[in-house]
Image (cartoon, helix red, strand yellow):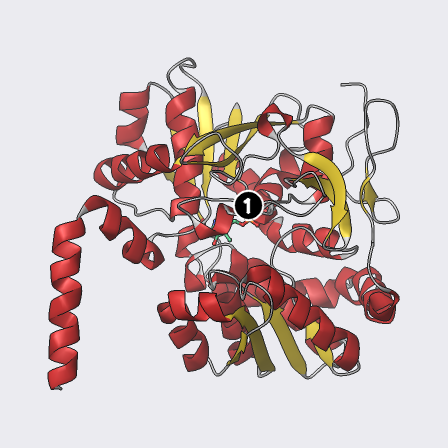
Amino acid sequence: MKHKIFIHSKKGFFGEDSKTSHAFGGRYVPEILYPALKELEIAYKTIMQKKSFAKEYRELLSKFVGRPTPLIYAKNASKILKNEIYLKFEGLANTGAHKINNAIGQVLLAKKMGKTRIIAETGAGQHGLAVSAACAKLGMECVIFMGEVDVKRQFPNVFNMQLFGAKVVSVQSGSKTLKDAVNEALREWSKESHNTFYVLGSALGPYPFPDIVRDFQSIISKELKTQCKKLKISPDILIACVGGGSNSIGFFRHFLLDSKVKLLAIEAGGKGKNIGENAIRMQNNNAKVGIAQGYKSYFLSDEYGNLSHTHSISAGLDYAGIGPQLAHLQEIGRVEFSSASDEEALEALKFFAKNEGIIPALESSHALAGAIKLSKTTKNKTIIVNVSGRGDKDIFITAKYLQKENWIAFLEEEAKTCKEM
Ligand SMILES: *Cc1c(COP(=O)(O)O)cnc(C)c1O
């Protein structure tokens, strides 16, 4: 590998501009957001680096999130797939996924900065859920921006956020989905940053968010190193799914300089190869280098540079951009990209449920599908898959695909008894 691996950004950028590489990341935002981001950068470089902060964070991870999450030997799957398969099960973290590692970290940081109010955007609701839980725990006021279309689609998550005491604002502008919620949250932040902290949910956005989110999610690979040592195993291949990139970068972090370990990222192959049918950005160099949502990276976009529509069975992987550090790691050849289709993800979900007694999130099922596909050509390797979340949340999707008739009958019966109540 001839290029340097950027573990942290340098002045906000990952990589260097040359004939064959780019400097990804940066802080491409309207002037009005500069003061808030500058203040955050200072907090990142001071408060977040303190030993006392790390200690408080670790305590929340163990006493609230439920860490360490287990490293499970998938004995039955290993036998069938002829590889040694291990699962790092983030699905056992409070609120059901890795997102809480970052949410509780940022809310703690906000508190130390003297902020009293938290805002965040959410699409499918998983990030909103994690932030709401973190705010309930740390006693912060919480406002979640969500497109009106998503509010209607995601009743269970909205319901739970409200149980946690969050105010869910239904955004009426534009297409009434995630990007409009992002715009609304940023507008609010630029006006109210004196008392308000904006919690970003993945390893992307303007500097210093990609560094902050990676650092908080790195707890995954830190634990994994210890767990591998204890089990006396050394992984050959690590596999994670990639939406924005937070679970993968946290899972890869402490293995980035260990060149013996192959790092494999799985994108959403969706239902077809055409534009709008998947969220494949890096595999086959589908996406173009561009600047959007405050940072430079690869984005799926049309001829005018507008972000393309994407599709995936899993809401968490359905994103047109990718975190700048992962873009850099792919470009220099450190992280390899592949994809799994909707159907392959569902097959992987069924396979690991039946053989290992876990129900992975649909997002994580893509990573598991990656392990199954790899096992067709690769044998006798130690493969660790990051199971970023558990699948309870997905029953409204999986039941529709796997048991449509029974699911409809169940919903109708529920509606009927509910009305009679
Ligand atoms: C949100 C989510 C993802 C995708 O986001 P990343 O930032 O790429 O990790 C993956 N898995 C689960 C369970 C999620 O909730």
Q: Position of residue 303 (x, y in %)?
A: 69, 38
- Which residue is at the front of the view, 295 or 366? 295
Residue with the mark numbered 1: 243
| Outermost residue to the front | 304
Q: Quadrant of residue 347?
A: top left
Viewer-nearest residue: 392 or 89: 392
Assign a secondary structure to mark 1. Answer: loop
**Residue 176 image-quadrant placement:** bottom right
Q: Amino acid at mark 1?
A: Gly
Q: Residue at x 33, y 35 (%)?
A: 343
Q: Position of residue 355 (x, y in %)?
A: 23, 35
Q: Residue at x 46, y 55 (%)?
A: 97
Where is residue 102? Give x, y as percent: 60, 60
Indicate the quadrant containing the N terminus: top left, top right, bottom left or bottom right. Answer: top right
Q: Is mark 1 within 8 Å of ligand 1?
A: yes
In the rendered image, which quarter contains the C terminus?
bottom left
> Which quadrant of the view contains residue 216?
bottom right
Does residue 108 appear in this view? yes
The residue sitting at 61% across, 65% down in the picture is 180
User: Does residue 257 appear in the picture of this structure?
Assistant: no
Residue 51: give x, y in percent of width and height: 74, 63
Q: Horizontally, is 350 left or right of 12 in the view?
A: left
Q: Residue at x 74, y 25 (%)?
A: 332
- Relative to residue 232, is residue 101 drawn left or right? right
Residue 155 drawn above or below residue 267 = below
For the view shown, which residue lies furthest in the bottom direction?
Answer: 421
Other residues around mark 1 within 10 Å, as few (<14) / some (14–19) / many (≥20) = many
| Left or right: where 356 falls relative to 214 | left
